[in-house]
Image (cartoon, grey):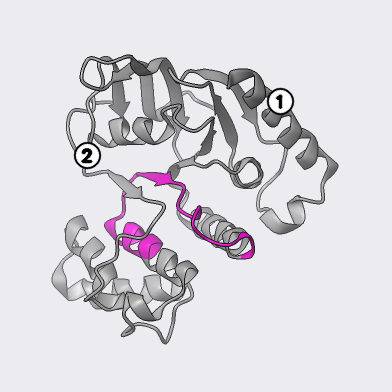
Amino acid sequence: MTQASPTLSIQHVAVAFNDGPPVIEDLSLDVAEGEFVAIVGPSGCGKSTLLKVISGLLPARAGQIHVAGPAANGPKPRIGFMFQRDTLLPWASVASNIAVGCELSGLPKEKHAGRIAELIALVRLQGYENHYPGALSGGMRQRVSLARLLAYDPDIFLMDEPFGALDYQTKILMGRELLRIWEASRRSIIFVTHDIEEAVALADRVIVMSTRPGRIVAIHQSLFKRPRDPRSLRGDPRFGALVQTIWSELAVAD
């Protein structure tokens, strides 16, 4: 995918905590408009830290991050964050949780109901509008989290192991749902995961990071056309070969 006009440009970024040793060092990466990028790497290499720096939640010690042109300083209204565990309001219904995203996006109040109904249909939760998070499965709660993120309508989705707490089967189903929704919206996604198969199944490019201080040691362009089904893709010999290649790179990087 062309990188001529990146939605996000990370330039020579370094991160350290309290003047300690670097967590990330001299990391540069461009993400194109509508591109799905997955990041894998050893635990502690700075994957989640990088997302926090992109979002403005953490400062960079050096380098710059540009979002659609201007330098990123502080929280960005055009960037949305989805965490491994849902951050739903336990006292609010499915519809009310999604309404939070509508409010943050600045959508006029009179349009909330229509947008919420549209998103509930998109994530296939019809009939659960008035249910509370405690009555939902883990996969259903993550669907609500995704709907709330879509209601916020960011240009860039930062996703920090959003399906990591789910069982294997549900994780694959959620990956398929994410691709279905992403195909409709085509927003830029940076997706952090420890699951190499998940990264290869979902992304346009897989970025491999080294152990701390985190650097990019390899970048793999996807071999698979879209639309794609993450479940059936796993039977393709090229899929297994790419997964093994990335495993080998991680073994060297660790």
Dot 2 surroundings within 10 Å: few (below 14), some, or many (20 or more)?
some
Would residue 45 be seen by someone viewing this image from the given angle?
yes
At a point 35% along the width and 32% down the height, the residue shown is 49
Which contiguous range is marked in magenta? 145-169
Q: What x and y, as percent, mark residue 203?
A: 58, 41
In depth, the one of 35 and 61 nearer the eye is 61
Q: Secondary structure at mark 2?
A: loop
Any mark on residue 184, and which? none
Q: In the figure, 100 relative to 30: above or below? A: below
Q: Amino acid at mark 1?
A: Ser
In depth, the one of 82 and 185 nearer the eye is 82
At a point 34% along the width and 75% down the height, the residue shown is 133
Any mark on residue 248, and which? 1
Q: Which quadrant, please, contains the N terminus? A: top right
Q: Which quadrant, please, contains the C terminus? A: top right
Asked if residue 162 is among those painted magenta in the image, a careful observer would answer yes
In depth, the one of 43 and 12 nearer the eye is 43
Q: Which residue is mark 2?
A: 76
